[in-house]
């Protein structure tokens, strides 16, 4: 019983000791709203006018039939990548082959006639030297020989044309590109001039950038443009080479065009984002966009001073790459609250994590 009583008394003493800790022995929690900060920095800020347009191919030939015939095979489909000279379809060559055979026979006929005429002319020249025939008879023979030679030249030209038409039964692409349209199908009969395919080449592209009439006196030919497209991570910088009023527009809205060599991944018909560089501000003070918040006093930032967030009204300017220019209200090197700024009030206590704060660059 004594041992049991002693254990109870010891346990009671430990509980009383734990409950009797002094307040200063309990670790105090940090005070203030936790935030992240960044330092205002100076940089050159471009003044941009942005728009969304489209990419166009400068070469999108419509390939038509050059000879008539039935389509035997279609070798490509819409979306196929093709090379210059690659066959797209095959036409029935029977008709043009028969035409070539007829032309070959005509050439052989006229060749025989021409050879005979040449021999006859040589005999007549000898007879003329012996005064057995008149000069008029010889001149007539010379004219007939010349006409026969012309017939032979014409027959050979017809044969060359017939042979060329045989080659045209293989319908080929004139350029490297992509099949945009397939108009014919196997078994279809086509005549000369009937459209069969449309191939779009992507070697050289043109960006069409629309702008409202309010920018008509600002956007000029030769201005620098920065281009991006959702179809590729590539970024391009080029210049406006043409400005043209919108077709059918009753106002002063216009299109600006930028022509460029395709670096490889840009696609005709894709969306393109264009940013025209109107000018630049050197040594501009910039801060992260999220550090500028709206309050009843206007747009403000919270400057870090002595563990507190001091509200300061600012005049924002141009935005670029997640940063905003501050025209009035801040100096280079001052620290501003970034994450958490929208929850603060003037003179609010803040707590900045020990990690090194982000710096605007």
Image: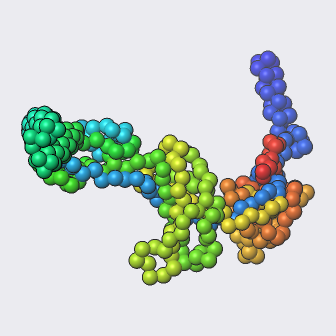
- Measured from the top left, where is residue 111 in percent x and y? 13, 35
Q: Residue at x 78, y 51 (%)?
A: 361
Percent of width and height locating residue 151: 15, 45
The image quadrant of residue 80 is top left
Residue placed most toward the observer, 238 or 317: 238
Residue 12 at least partly seen = yes
Q: Residue at x 40, y 77 (%)?
A: 248
Horizontal arrangement in the rendering, residue 255 relative to residue 194 (left or right) = right
Residue 272, image x, y percentages: 51, 56
Q: Which residue is nearer to you in this view: 105 or 360?
A: 105
Residue shown at the point (80%, 42%) measured from the top left: 355
Q: Position of residue 160 (x, y in %)?
A: 21, 40
Residue, far front: 131
Against 88, residue 7 (above or below) is above
| Residue located at (34% from left, 45% from top) | 174
Instruction: Count the labels in the image.
Output: 0
Residue 34 visible (yes or no): no
Foreground residue, 10 or 223? 223
With 36 as the anchor, is 103 left or right in this view?
A: left
């Amino acid at each position: 019983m004594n041992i049991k009583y002693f254990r109870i008394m010891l346990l009671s003493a430990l509980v009383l000791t734990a409950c009797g800790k002094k307040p200063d022995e309990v670790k105090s929690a940090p005070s203030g709203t936790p935030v992240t900060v960044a330092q205002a920095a100076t940089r050159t800020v471009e003044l941009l006018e942005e728009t969304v347009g489209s990419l166009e191919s400068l070469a999108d030939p419509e390939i038509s039939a050059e000879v008539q015939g039935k389509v035997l095979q279609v070798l490509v489909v819409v979306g196929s990548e093709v090379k210059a000279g690659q066959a797209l379809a095959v036409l029935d060559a029977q008709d043009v082959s028969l035409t070539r055979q007829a032309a070959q026979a005509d050439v052989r006929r006229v060749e025989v006639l021409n050879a005979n005429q040449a021999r006859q002319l040589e005999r007549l020249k000898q007879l003329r030297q012996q005064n057995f025939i008149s000069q008029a008879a010889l001149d007539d023979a010379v004219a007939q020989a010349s006409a026969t030679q012309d017939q032979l030249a014409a027959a050979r030209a017809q044969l060359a044309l017939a042979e060329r038409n045989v080659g045209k039964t293989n319908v080929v692409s004139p350029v490297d590109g992509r099949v945009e349209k397939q108009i014919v199908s196997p078994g279809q009969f086509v005549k000369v001039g009937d459209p069969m395919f449309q191939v779009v080449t992507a070697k050289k592209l043109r960006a069409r950038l629309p702008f409202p009439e309010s920018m008509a006196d600002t956007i000029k030919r030769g201005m620098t443009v920065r281009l991006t497209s959702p179809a590729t991570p590539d970024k391009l910088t080029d210049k406006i080479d043409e400005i043209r009023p919108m077709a059918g527009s009753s106002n002063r809205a216009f299109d600006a065009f930028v022509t460029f060599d395709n670096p490889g991944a840009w696609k005709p018909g894709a969306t393109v984002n264009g940013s025209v560089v109107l000018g630049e501000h050197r040594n501009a003070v910039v801060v992260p966009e999220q550090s500028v918040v709206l309050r009843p006093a206007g747009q403000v930032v919270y400057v870090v001073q002595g563990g507190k967030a001091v509200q300061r009204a600012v005049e924002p300017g141009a935005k670029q790459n997640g940063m905003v220019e501050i025209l009035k209200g801040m100096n280079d090197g001052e620290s501003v609250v970034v994450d958490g700024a929208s929850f603060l009030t003037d003179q609010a206590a803040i707590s900045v994590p020990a990690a090194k704060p982000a710096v605007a660059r």
